[in-house]
Amino acid sequence: MKDAYSYPEYCDIAYDWGRAGECDFIETCAAKFSSGKGRRILDIACGTGIHLREFARRGYETCGIDSSPEMAEYVKKRSAAEELAADCRVSDMKGFILPGKYSFAICMLDSFRYMLTDEDISIHLGAVSESLDKGGIYFIDLWMPVAGSPVEWEDVSWTQERGGTTVKARYVQHGKTFDPAVRTFEDELIFKVSGPREPRTLISRAITRLLEQDEFYGIVERQGSFEPVRRFYNFDFGSKGAYNIKQIRTNLILKKRR
């Protein structure tokens, strides 16, 4: 049965708000913290390529990977329609192999949390490291609760419209499903779509991981390919973690060691 992620056009509408500022922030981080000055970027679990296409507009050589064939095909079609040089390949986040090296890599919109075990994350970090130039950075954007504080499970709704199609979206983290032994829980994405086509409701459910900062940095240290550089919130160098409905993320920056 097809779910919300099987309809890239609706995902693209739902998540299409001001990404230019986010890409500005990532560019600044690359300039500040990366040893290289290359113009090649890898977007991991790129979805519909919202960030990928924005970087392509800025003259970057871009490549995305996503496990969904529908998403990869959508990225290629949108990029071609916009005359952007953006490639996209169907690949799992773990253990991927790509030709050439990239100046920096990004993993946006909580995609990192779909890796459920320390081993998954370690394999992933090794693959990212192999794809980066020496001294390149890896920018990770995800929801990460504050260690030692009660978890505030997310339940957020928003509405986006494009070309007569409206997507009313809701994202819910089901805290009651949290399994402390493996640190996972169920989340849910719901789209209520209206417009020229017949109205429809699309639902995606998944198991994702609750990953805290100390836990994450411990995995990074044991794996050994990267060193933590900085942590920010909400694509803002001055933010202390005050979230709003569309900016509820932690921005983690890793730098390749070797």
Image (tube, grey):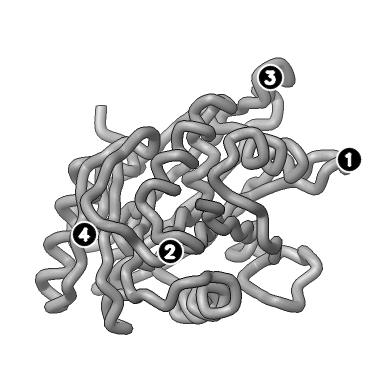
Q: In the displayed structure, would residue 197 be above or below residue 179?
A: below
Badge 1 crowding class, 10 Å Cα cut-off, few under 14, some 14 to 19, many 20 or more, is: few
Q: Earlier in the sequence, mark 2 or mark 1?
A: 2
Q: Earlier in the sequence, mark 3 or mark 2?
A: 2
The numbered mark, 4 or 1, whose residue comes first in the sequence reads: 4
Residue holding disc 4: 75
Q: Secondary structure at mark 3?
A: strand
Of tags 4 and 2, which is closer to the observer? 2
Cα separation between marks 1 and 3:
17 Å
- Which residue carries the number 1 mark? 148
Residue named by callout 2:
104
Q: Residue flagged by tag 2: what amino acid is it?
A: Phe
**Label 4 secondary element:** helix
Q: Which residue is mark 3?
A: 179
**Disc nearest the viewer among 3 and 2:** 2
**What amino acid is labelled 4 in the image?**
Val
What's the residue type where badge 3 is placed?
A: Asp
| Spot occupied by residue 76 in the image (x, y as percentages of width and height) | 15, 60
In space, the residues marked 4 and 3 are separated at their CA atoms by 35 Å
- Horizontal placement of 101 versus 209: left or right? left
Mark 4–mark 1 Cα distance, whole angstroms, equals: 40 Å
